[in-house]
Image (spheres, helix red, strand yellow):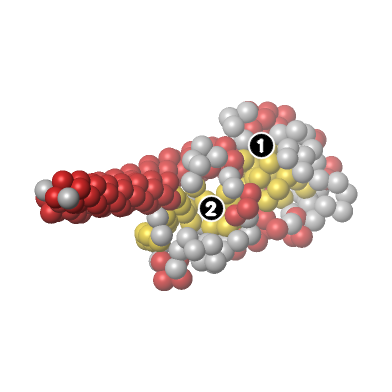
Amino acid sequence: MRKILVVLSIVLAVAGVYFIEVHFAEAYELEIERARQEADLIESEINLSFEKIESDLSTLYGDPKLVAYLNEVNSKEDIRSHRNFDYVFELLKSKADQGYMYAWIANDRANFFLDNTDFIGPDGYDPKKRPWYEAIDQEGIYYSDPYSDIIVENSLMTAIKVIDDIPYSFVCLDFSISNIFDRFEEAILIDENGMVVYSKNQEHFASSVVDLGYLTEDILSSDEGTYEKEGTISVLKEIQPMKHKLLVHKDFSEIRDKQMSYKVMMQTGCVGLLLLVILITIFFKRQVKECDE
């Protein structure tokens, strides 16, 4: 009887540990696959957001009256006196109402800046000294690095298009990054060097994803990749129109912790069962010994 109980306890222990390993391995693999699918979905939705931005921007730089305005405003005096001023101002206001913080245009011949709030750059305003001016060397649409706007208290980016036929004229849309990224808890925006430029988690800002342990240098240097480490997965995705990349990081430590706790419970139960067998064996030996006496 004693041998049967010992064997039974060992079998139960092995079977229990095996079941836990298999069950949680399957659960972990399922979560990994879900993470990849979620990363694909986030990538798709974010790319759609940027496609909308580019489409909305194209309606500005493709508008003949706005182009004529930028082409013909050569001095500060021309800004409000131009025949297209009212039309351009209403166009900027209507564009900003479509979900943008600001819609604005600039022209360095007249050193002016005009946005949807009717703000015009003050005397001495020099577009060449603005960080977005480097867009003149870019083809297509240029996206600024994220920056904090103290007026709206939000993190913004600017989509900028240089009008090719008019030297140094710009049409621009400022948009909130949080409106795009905060819908996705695990989404992190990083630059080409792997530095976090936007994350819902404030502790991530200005940190390297390599130092955080989310990616390796090899994966970071590629356009896309997946990195698994100690119960976490990081999926790197390319955002088509930007120099930045999307990182989706998920932590499965909860599953791992449950697995460990169940293992401890199973091991504790097995030890308890073995102790019970030992106690029962000792009890029966004493009973037999008393009977013999």
| Amino acid tagged 2 | Leu
102 shown above or below 134? above
Q: Give the residue at mark 1.
A: 101
Give the residue displayed 27% in from the left and 49% down from the top: 279
Closest to the observer, 282 or 133? 282
Q: In the orientation shown, which residue stands out farthest toward the bottom?
A: 218
Give the residue displayed 34% in from the left and 50% down from the top: 268
Residue 95 screen position, x and y as percent: 61, 32
Left or right: where does residue 168 sit relative to residue 284? right
Give the residue displayed 47% in from the left and 60% down from the top: 214
Label drawn at residue 150: none
Label 1 crowding class (10 Å Cα cut-off): few <14, some 14-19, many 20+? some
Left or right: where does residue 122 sit relative to residue 213? right
Tell me which label, 2 or 1, sits earlier in the chain. Answer: 1
Residue 222 screen position, x and y as percent: 40, 66
Residue 206 visible in the picture: yes
Left or right: where does residue 158 sit relative to residue 53? right
